[in-house]
Amino acid sequence: MKWCSSCHAHKESWAEHPSYKSYETYRRYDRCWSCDNWTLCHCHHGCCDHGASEALRSANSSLISQNSSLQSELSSKNTQINEKDKQITRYTTDLANTQRQLDEKDRQLTVKTGQLETLTGLFNDLKIENNNKDKEIETKDKKIKNLNVKLVGSQEEVFNYKLKEQERELDEFIQQLGIGRENPRELRKAYQRLLKAHENYNQDNIDRAEDEIEKTKDELLSSGWFKRGMSLENVQRLCGKCEGIARLKIEQGKIQEQKWQQQQEQYEARQEVPPHNNN
């Protein structure tokens, strides 16, 4: 089986060309049935075709060149594939590391969430305990205020009792001296003004109160010629009793003021409490 070098169609071998009759000029030719091309067979056996061989060599060279080009492209593609495989491996490793980091973060977040829940529970417990303590403190504060009211009341009663006793003793002493109540009353008021002036650090009032006390003493001593009991010692005792009553009077006024303030606070506290809804 042979192929035409011109049209690459099938051709058959013929024994001779019609234009040659002698043996010497005998040639072996091949004829293409497609293009009717006659090709000389150089081996006289019709087994070779020079044109076909050239075409085959050319085709083979082209195929070799194409094969080489394809091999180069294949090698390049394989190199690219290997590089892509390396990148995929690297990305896979990075992804695995990232996944492990995420798992660790999730674990830490779980621990932190548990700790936060624990702290929240403790905070709520402390808040409840604090509210209970506030209520307890409020209750105790009310009890203390009530006790203070009772204490103030008790102190007022004590001062009232002491004041009455000292006033009774002063009256008895005045009777013993045989003098009137006017001078002792003036002494008691002068001592009250003197004590208040000392509390307020008012020197002018202190000086005036002391002058009044000295004038009253002078009056009492000057009447001693007519009253046998009016001596310097008795005047001093009288001044001491008047000063003692003056001190009790001042303390009594402070207790009464404190009691009034407590009553005012209790009244304001009752006004702030909303009324109970019975519905």
Image: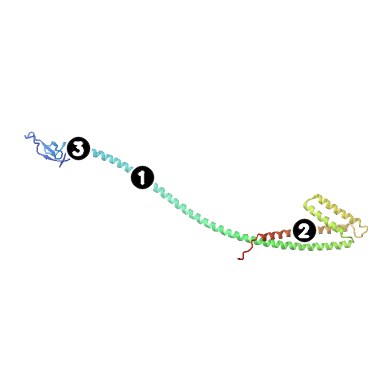
- The spot of residue 76 in percent (x, y) is 32, 41
The residue closer to the viewer here, 257 or 92, is 257
Disc 1 or disc 2, which is closer to the eye? 2
User: Residue drawn at (81%, 63%), measured in percent from left and top?
Assistant: 164
Q: Using the rendered view, name the quadrant where residue 47 is placed.
A: top left
Under tag 1, what secondary structure? Answer: helix
The residue closer to the viewer here, 38 or 40, is 38
C-alpha distance separating marks 1 and 2: 102 Å
In the displayed structure, would residue 22 be above or below residue 130? above
Q: Is residue 83 left or right of residue 46?
A: right
User: Residue drawn at (28%, 39%), measured in percent from left and top?
Assistant: 69
* Residue that mark 1 sits on: 84
Identify the amino acid type marked 1. Answer: Lys
- The spot of residue 271 in percent (x, y) is 67, 60
* Residue that mark 2 sits on: 253
C-alpha distance separating marks 1 and 3: 42 Å
* Residue that mark 3 sits on: 55
- The spot of residue 264 in percent (x, y) is 71, 59
Q: Residue furthest top?
A: 25
C-alpha distance separating marks 2 and 3: 142 Å
In the displayed structure, would residue 196 be above or below residue 160? above
- The spot of residue 223 in percent (x, y) is 91, 57
Under tag 2, what secondary structure? Answer: helix
